[in-house]
Image (cartoon, rainbow, N blue to C red):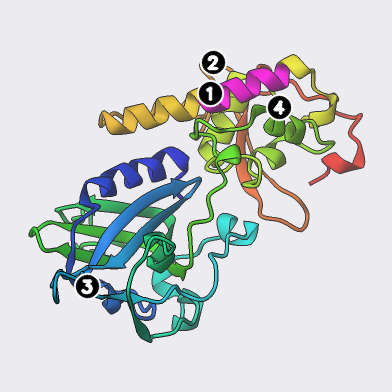
Amino acid sequence: MPEGPSVKRFQLLTAPFVGQVVAKVGGSSRQRNLKDLKAMKLQDSQASGKNLFLAFGAVLEAWTVSGSPAPAIRGKADSGACSLTLAQEGQEADVSRLSPKEHGVQRKQETELSVPDASHAAGDTWKWLRFHFGLFGSIRANEFSRANKANKRGDWKDPVPRLVLHFDSDSFLVFYNCRIHWCTSPAVEPASDILSPEFHRGQALAALRQPMPICYTLLDQRYFSGLGNIIKNEILYLARIHPLSQGSLLALSDLESLLDHAVQFSTDWLHKKLAGKGLHYQIYLKEKCPLGHEVMQETFGPQDGFKRLSWWCPQCQPRVPPEGNDPKSLKH
């Protein structure tokens, strides 16, 4: 699934549409009440880790009676906050196969007449959508994705968008392979977001020093929001750390180096995406490391959690503790 840099790029792609009014809603999503977005204004766009949040609010129509401002029709806030469990973060399925029940939460369909005042913030009446993207999830602005090869049946079928938002400016946004949920407000934790200026290094270091394989901790979105499998593999190689090395046994300098690589790699990846450049992998999907050593590949993960593929070089990334001296916590 798209990692933090990709989702941040999606957010920057949607930002120019803020302030525009939705003229028409299309797409294959079965999420309830997406048609209600018609005639609403896109009010805000935020990214947090692997999630994109868009806010919509009613358009205020100005009319006056004896010089008094007109009342405004505003939608009620949706019931139910966004669900950001680790299971959802790590095990997204192909959204085209999900049932209607799996696509979201129930929400009220009523509206109320209210007169805005200084004590009632506009954000309180916004309707928020949370987008979590699947493996091939993406957003297009003013264009549709086209098939670049035939499928297994030999058909050249264009990808089916989950949601299409047409705006009154004749521009549009297209969302592919994503899960869409209504929520009351964005669940944003900048202290754990690797691309946020407020990313908390002390909190991240404390998490890395836990007595468990370092590759488990790196994918924990509570501490490294937006860090995915590609970033995990690349920064472990750059820091010369074996994925199953126990965090509590690594030197503080090694953990600080790993953290530096996490932030720098993610930032560089974002800049390359914005410049339309591809990412050159050092170890991910490789058969040999840059030094010519054979690369190992295996699936690791907690016994009761999601498991992901790891690529590493046994010579460049020695294991701590060495093979044969593993504590039980290192078993997989």
Tag 1: amino acid: Lys
Task: Please give the name of the residue rendered at 22% of the width and 72% of the height, measured from the top-left corner.
Answer: 26
**Badge count:** 4
Q: Label 3 to label 4, Cα distance in Å?
A: 47 Å
Please state which amino acid type lies under the numbered disc 3: Gly
Residue at the spot 63% in from the left edge and 32% down from the top edge: 200
Q: Mark 4: few, some, or many residues within 10 Å (few <14, many ≥20)?
A: many
Instruction: Check disc 4 and report its element: helix, strand or loop.
Output: loop
Residue 157 visible in the snapshot: no
Q: Residue at x 73, y 14 (%)?
A: 253
Callout 4, which amino acid?
A: His
Give the label on residue 242, or none: 4
Residue at the spot of label 2: 292
Query: Over which residues does the magenta segment extend?
Result: 254-263
Nearest-to-viewer mark from 4 and 2:
4
> Is-magenta flag for residue 125?
no
Q: Amino acid at mark 2?
A: Gly
- Residue 309 in percent (x, y) is at 60, 43
Q: Which residue is mark 1?
A: 288
Circle 2 packing at 10 Å, graded few (<14), some (14-19), many (20+), is few
Say which mark, if any, is on residue 26.
Answer: 3
Q: Position of residue 190 (x, y in %)?
A: 55, 41
